[in-house]
Amino acid sequence: MTALVYNIVIYKGADFSLTVRWKDKGTGAPISLAGRSVLLQVRKRPGQELIAEFSTEDGRITTDDDDGEMTIAAAGGYTDLLTPGDYSYNLEVSVDGTDPIHRDRLMEGDCEIRERINSETT
């Protein structure tokens, strides 16, 4: 399976949300997420320090099992902890969260974490 390349931007201290729908490439039918775990990790380079993590285990990824839809989201309190910079990410779906061999990489790309220009309230 070839992963979709899609770049994302997360603003430090702001709420973040991205919705993705997993579909069969041939038929366009949604692929069920029932019994699967979803994981998105952000790193500078593969194998380096983890910058951010979103998963079904930590509740930052929620799924609509039958529709193949997953929403990656974090409140500003979480994104405020992130260090601005240029990183890479990948989004993987597995049958169970402990088996690294049986994962499908759905998306990957650049992840830019930016400072908010208007970060103070008046």
Image (cartoon, helix red, strand yellow):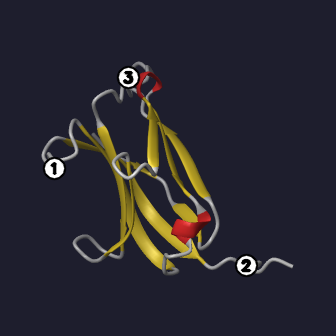
Residue to which mark 3 is pinned: 26
User: Which badge, 3 or 1, comes first in the chain's sequence?
Assistant: 3
51 horizontally vs 100: left or right: right
Amino acid tagged 2: Ser
Question: Residue 100 location, x and y as percent?
Answer: 15, 49
Amino acid tagged 3: Gly
Q: Residue at x 59, y 73 (%)?
A: 12
Question: Residue 8 location, x and y as percent?
Answer: 53, 60
User: Which badge, 3 or 2, comes first in the chain's sequence?
Assistant: 3
SS at circle 2: loop
**Disc number for residue 11:** none
Q: Nearer the viewer, mark 3 or mark 1?
A: 1
Residue to which mark 2 is pinned: 119
Residue found at the far right of this picture: 122
**Disc number for residue 100:** 1
Cα separation, mark 3 vs mark 2, equals 45 Å
Kindly indicate whether the residue at mark 2 contacts the one at mark 3 (C-beta within 8 angstroms): no
SS at circle 1: loop
Q: Is residue 101 above or below residue 47?
A: above
Question: Residue 4 location, x and y as percent?
Answer: 41, 47
Cα separation, mark 3 vs mark 1, equals 26 Å
Amino acid tagged 1: Pro
Nearer to me, 68 or 74: 74
> In the picture, residue 51 is in which quadrant?
bottom left
Q: Residue at x 49, y 76 (%)?
A: 82
